[in-house]
Image (tube, coloured by chain):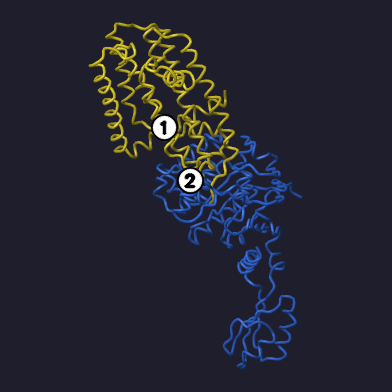
Chain colours: A yellow, B blue
Amino acid sequence: MQAFKKYWKIFWRFRKLELMRMMEYRGDFLFWALVSILWTGFNFFFFSLILRVSDTVAGWTADEMYLLLGTFTLLDAFTWTFFYQNMQRYTRHVFTGSLTMLLTKPISTIFLLTTSSNSFNNIFRFLIGCAAIVISLHRMEITPSISSVVLYFFALMAAALFIYAIWFMASTLSFWIEKLDNINEIIPGLRRVMQVPRGVFAGAASVLFTVLLPISLVASVPSEILLQKAETKWVVWLFVSSFLSLLLARKFFYFAIKRYSSVGN
Amino acid sequence: MSQPVITVSNLKKHFTVYKKQPGLLGSIRSLWHREYETVAAVDDISFTINQGEIVGFIGQNGAGKTTTLKMLSGLLYPTSGSVSVLGYNPWNRKSAFQKQFSLVLGQKNQLWWDLPAIETFLLNQAIYDIPEAQFRKTLNKLVNLLDVKDSIQIQVRKLSLGQRMKCELIAALLHNPKVLFLDEPTIGLDVVMQKTLRDFISEYNREFGATVILTSHYMDDVKELCKRVIMIDHGKKIYDGLLSNIISKYARNKTLSLVFSESVTKKSLTEFGTVKNWNGSSATLLVSRKEATKIAARLLESLPVQDLNIEEAPLEAIIREVFGNKAKSA
């Protein structure tokens, strides 16, 4: 309990430091906030074009698709807020040797690498995502039960942890591949897979993106929970794969740290 | 007799490094074929350090000093050998161990660049579980000792190198570490700031009984702070003992400075030793260390000597010569 309190306190101190830093560079914040809003707007616009020529996408109606996009936007804003900068820093720490300073601290290095930074640029995307979910549910005249809403948030959390785990493992490769800046573009590149219904994928792609690397489940399964059409096996697989990938990410990090050679000084 | 705080036995660290052939062709070749070689950064080093000692690590660039410090801090896993610091195996990275030591790398920083240093201090207070009263007391003491009361409220990126280094030291010492690894803490600082930091390290060692390992390329740092030095060359320990004994072990010559009452020729001096300087009325001779007293007596008898001084060679010159000879023989 004492340890949890300590980590909780440090987590919020990091948020405070980042908030202070953001206020030092408010122009940068406003610009990136605008870029992220535009990006989200273009994304909705792109799918609206598809839905004009096709009534459904893999069996999902337009309103269901907007619910899925809303869920994806929430998830994406969250991962962009907490993971992108930290993973960029992680690979840079390994490359420049500044990981040294983190490793001497009497606190989990994974915690430091994962939580020390964040951005606030995506805060408006949270609001857009929430608005898309509420409006689409209203249009479909669906009032989800409290248990569905609770399960939805747990599923979103599991999805975020799954993305975190695979991103962290990819960044951990920087212990072997010295300059790995672009790894931080590969995981976001998979976002195209996340924002379409899992039914879009067939054959080998389906096995790859729903079973082996279940990235197509991260927005689809929570959305299906709200739409009351979720299949139990996929809900369970989302939670199980998140848990397993987190364990694997942790083991991989401790394996990698043994071959850390720092850099010359 | 104080207890050993640091015990190092047969410590080795080998790195595999990639050897790139020069030029564009070399880069293209390296795409499918890379040559690697194993470098012994630390090669079978053993020593013990007692509580409260300040020990200087001396060696050329790439000698293995920082690699040793990183292994003592638990950052690098050794190829073989064992280390105990404060009774802990550093590679287990126990929180209880990490709360008792600090590593300061002169070329790396832990301060948050865009924020005032006080914010990093507060973060370290949370990370190291420092109680509020102890934190305030230690912070006030360190801030006063280093005279940075105003600097800690200013964004780190706007501080001078000297002010920043002082703040780095405060960040590293807030938890009152029992063991301090200082890797070139005065690098890039002007002589006044170097002196301030040296005085501070000495004061910290006295007040807290801290054990300190210091690496520095500035001999003034070593001379002022360390009674004992460990010399490392190409990963091997070549000397471990009192700084003052380096002179008796490695210095081959002494310098005789002579002032004459009448002009003497250069030729008349050559039979006594190597003439370094000569202008007729004064001269400087390099003579064998063992024979220095006898040669001085002979000079007084045979030449019109008005004043004579026998001096040891400067420590810097001796160390330069030691590493120079090793490099030639390598």
Q: Are marks 1 and 2 in contact (CB under 8 Å)?
A: no
Residue of label 2? B31
Quadrant including the C terminus of chain B: bottom right
Please report the residue visible at 56 percent of the width from the left and 24 percent of the height from the top: A247
Q: Residue at x 48, y 48 (%)?
A: B167
> From the viewer's perspective, is residue B312 above or below residue A106?
below
Q: Neighbour class for label 2 at 10 Å: few (<14), some, many (≥20)?
A: few
Identify the mark at residue B213; answer none if there is no mark.
none
Mark 1 surroundings: few (<14), some (14-19) or many (≥20) residues within 10 A = few
* Quarter of the view holding residue B222: bottom right
Q: Is A185 situated left or right of B223 in this image?
A: left
Q: In the picture shown, does residue B25 fall above or below A9?
A: below
Observer-side mark, 1 or 2, equals: 2
**Label 2: element kind:** loop
User: Chain for mark 2?
Assistant: B
Specify the subunit that label 1 lies on.
Answer: A
- Residue B294 in which image quadrant: bottom right
Residue A152 in the image: x percent, y percent? Answer: 41, 13
Which amino acid, mark 2? Leu
Disc 1 to disc 2, how far (Cα)? 22 Å
Q: Secondary structure at mark 1?
A: helix
Which residue is outermost to the bottom?
B262
Q: Is residue A21 above or below residue A166?
A: below
Residue A153: x and y in percent read: 42, 15
Residue B218, quarter of the rendered image:
bottom right
- Residue designated by label 1: A186
Q: Are marks 1 and 2 on the same chain?
A: no
Toward the viewer: A120 or A208? A208
User: Which amino acid is tagged 1?
Assistant: Ile
Q: Does residue B4 lie above or below B296 as drawn?
A: above
Percent across and percent down for residue A206 are: 43, 18
